[in-house]
């Protein structure tokens, strides 16, 4: 932190402190000593944590730390922390979930007044960042008149800018960067009994696995062994933005411990219902998603650390125009309809195959009713049949899913005045392995192209995002990749493989070489 940065931070601290002091003093309600004690005792119960937070720091307080009432997950996560003095809780909460404020101010203060914290350590990615975390805590302990009225004057000595302060009841709070030593930390007989490892994950540093391992061993070893004999809560507030980083290392180290708790909160569910409904609306969720690209939103809002082009690069996705009057003799169609009603994507596609090369003529990739997808199938059938083309059509379903899907297909068939339904087909084996084995090489070698007219459609936009997000183990939608993989694999089996995959000769679609017996 430069001298200018330090002066700016100090000026902000002084101004904020003055405002908090004045506004919280003016909000104090007159009450009898008995009423005050009853209210305090009630607020200090773990089941009333969010009431505690809202009273001292929440929306009812001027210049509050929150702009909405607490979320349900703020309460449920804290109860676990309160009940287990040795908890290791990973708070994989979405960006904007108030994880730092609750961990480093709300939780600490509630634990402190319940005599559950005597030495709190706030760890950031570096000393400057850690000091700023400590400043939020000191500001309210020193100047929040509501808090002072109930619990007395707090500050004894020290300052957040120096990375440490002590309160009048003998509690010490210290800030350290992840790159600083944790061994031997204690105040008199008090060793660390609470540690917050706040936002320490770094996507760039995660590429250096040696550094990641050093940080993980420091947290689980140096810090883990520095805790108090009878208390040692470790909270890790950090959304899951990268694989094989610090969070994965901590989880691997503690996953078998009975004290380990992985608390995952995404911004919303599959239907855009917000997790923090007290703050966000469905419209807010849609606006947030529209303001950023898919990959960033998945990392920051949905704890799904995907990287653009992890397996299939964006530059491998190619387009080419198709003569609308061309007659194709070999067309494959496949549908992945998702068992849930509206949750996952319903995906379908038609490709033409020639010499192992695939050309995607039609795409459907949306969150919708299954009936919408089935109607699209019959729309495609009518269009291509009118041009004298036949399509070999399949849909994915297990035996149990077929019982559900087949009647729906028959209804759609009748509604569309059609003659038949697609063939039920379900391939065994790991889906991600098959997608990776078939499609990665196909895209890399330029053996698959998309029709030019698909570019810019909602289906192609979704497909582009899902393809470039794909990697084994990801929770990104893979329905359309399953469709493409099935079409390519079935097409090659039915219409033959390329003898010269690097040839630039225009393919003759649908022509298959006869095999000699």
Image: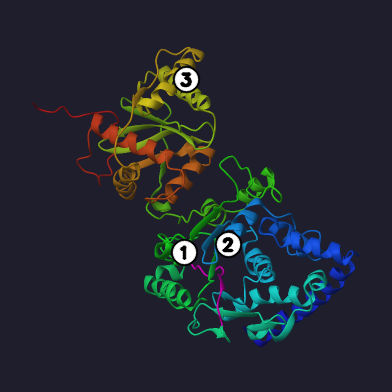
Residue that label 1 marks: 247
Residue 179, visible in the rendered structure: yes
Front residue of 68/156: it is 156
Location of residue 66 in the rendering, given as x and y in whole percent from the top left corner? 73, 61
Location of residue 357 in the rendering, given as x and y in whole percent from the top left corner? 30, 39
Q: Earlier in the sequence, mark 3 or mark 2?
A: 2
| Quadrant holding the C terminus | top left
Residue that label 2 marks: 81
Was residue 378 drawn as part of the magenta stretch in this picture?
Answer: no
Residue that label 3 marks: 408
Where does the magenta region start and end?
Answer: 190-203
Marks 3, 1: nearer the viewer: 1
What secondary structure is found at the residue carrying circle 2? helix
What secondary structure is found at the residue carrying circle 1? helix
CA–CA distance in space, label 3 to label 2 = 48 Å
Please name the residue shown 37% across and 53% down the image. Answer: 311
- Label 3 with label 2: CB-CB less than 8 Å: no
């Amino acid at each position: 932190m430069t001298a200018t940065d330090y002066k700016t931070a100090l000026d902000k601290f002084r101004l904020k402190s003055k405002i908090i002091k004045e506004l919280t003093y003016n909000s104090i309600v007159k009450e009898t000593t008995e009423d005050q004690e009853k209210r305090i005792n009630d607020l200090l119960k773990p089941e009333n944590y969010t009431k505690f937070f809202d009273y001292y720091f929440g929306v009812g307080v001027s210049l509050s730390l929150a702009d909405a009432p607490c979320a349900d997950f703020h309460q449920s996560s804290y109860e676990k922390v309160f009940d287990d003095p040795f908890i290791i809780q990973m708070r994989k909460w979405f960006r904007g979930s108030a994880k730092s404020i609750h961990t480093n101010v709300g939780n600490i203060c509630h634990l402190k007044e319940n005599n559950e914290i005597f030495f709190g350590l706030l760890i950031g990615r570096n000393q400057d960042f850690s000091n700023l975390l400590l400043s939020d805590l000191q500001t309210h302990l020193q100047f929040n008149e509501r808090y002072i009225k109930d619990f007395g004057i707090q500050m004894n000595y020290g300052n957040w800018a120096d990375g440490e302060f002590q309160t009048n009841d003998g509690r010490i709070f210290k800030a350290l960067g992840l790159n600083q030593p944790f061994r031997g930390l204690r105040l008199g007989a008090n060793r660390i009994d609470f540690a917050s490892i706040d936002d320490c994950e770094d996507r760039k540093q995660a590429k250096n696995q040696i550094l990641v391992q050093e940080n993980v061993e420091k947290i689980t070893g140096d810090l883990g062994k520095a805790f108090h004999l009878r208390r040692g809560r470790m909270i890790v507030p950090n959304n899951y933005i990268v694989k094989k980083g610090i969070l994965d290392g901590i989880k691997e180290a503690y996953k078998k411990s009975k004290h380990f708790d992985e608390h995952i909160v995404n911004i919303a569910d599959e239907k855009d219902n917000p997790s923090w409904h007290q703050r966000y609306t469905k419209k807010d969720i849609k606006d947030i998603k529209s303001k950023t690209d898919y990959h960033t939103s998945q990392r920051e809002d949905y704890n799904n650390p995907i990287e653009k082009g992890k397996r299939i690069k964006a530059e491998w996705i190619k387009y080419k125009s198709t003569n609308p009057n061309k007659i194709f003799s070999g067309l494959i169609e496949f549908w992945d309809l998702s068992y849930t009603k509206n949750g996952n994507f319903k995906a379908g596609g038609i490709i033409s195959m020639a010499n192992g090369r695939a050309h995607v003529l039609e795409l459907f990739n949306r969150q919708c009713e299954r009936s919408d997808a089935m109607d699209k199938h019959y729309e495609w059938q009518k269009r291509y049949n009118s041009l004298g083309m036949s399509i070999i059509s399949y849909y994915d379903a297990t035996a149990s899913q077929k019982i559900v899907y087949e009647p729906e297909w028959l209804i759609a068939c009748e509604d569309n005045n059609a003659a038949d339904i697609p063939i039920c087909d379900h391939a065994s084996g790991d889906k991600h392995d098959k997608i990776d084995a078939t499609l990665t090489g196909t895209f890399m070698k330029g053996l698959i192209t998309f029709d030019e007219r698909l570019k810019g459609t909602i289906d192609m936009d979704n497909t582009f995002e899902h393809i470039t997000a794909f990697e084994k183990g990801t929770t990104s939608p893979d329905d359309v990749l399953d469709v493409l993989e099935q079409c390519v694999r079935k097409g090659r089996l039915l219409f033959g493989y390329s003898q010269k995959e690097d040839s630039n000769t225009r393919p003759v679609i649908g022509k298959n070489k006869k095999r000699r017996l």
